[in-house]
Image: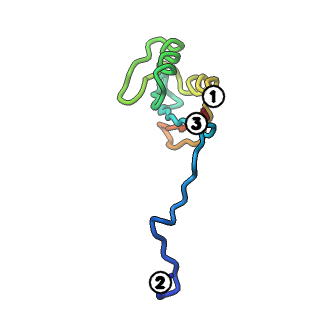
Amino acid sequence: MDTTGSQTLSPCNLASIPLTEEDSVVYIAIKGSLHANDCSVFGLGDEEKRALSKKFPGSGVVVNGISIKSNVLDTLNTLSQLGYKIVSSTGETEITWTLQRII
């Protein structure tokens, strides 16, 4: 505590959560509009990119991700079949969904 009775925090007081191999989590993001016929997915591994490109022909590479030639809901449903679950979303016209998968 300082002289005023208030508690001060130092960087040493930050909590850390140890992850074991069983608790490893992968996060990805999808950006798209409910009114469009394409979306972009970021953070996928090479195998997942190939699987989506095969399922959605015409998909291609974008900076840090892949552009999917399908509506965002079909893409979200496909990723849920790969074990991803939505953990958050933000936006109005263009929405970004964050998904996670425990590996």
Query: Identity of the amino acid at label 1?
Result: Gly
Identify the mark at residue 100; answer none if there is no mark.
Answer: 3
Q: Crowding near pointer 1: few (<14 within 10 Å), some, many (20+)?
A: few
Of circles 1 and 2, the one toward us is 2
Q: Nearer the viewer, residue 62 or 100?
A: 100
The mark closer to the camera, 2 or 3, is 2
Which amino acid is tagged 2?
Asp
Q: Quadrant of the C terminus?
A: top right
The residue that disc 2 covers is: 2
Up the image or down, 26 lies above or below 4; here it is: above
Residue located beneath label 1 in the image: 83
Which residue occupies 52% across, 43% down?
90
Q: CA distance from mark 1 to mark 2?
A: 49 Å
Q: Could you classify mark 3 by the number of other residues whose Cα lies within 10 Å: few (under 14), some (14-19), or many (20 or more)?
A: some
Residue at the far left: name it: 63
Please tell me which of labels 1 and 2 falls first in the chain: 2
Q: Give the structural element (helix, strand or loop) at label 1.
A: loop
Disc 3/disc 1 C-alpha distance (Å):
8 Å
Marks 1,2: beta carbons within 8 A: no
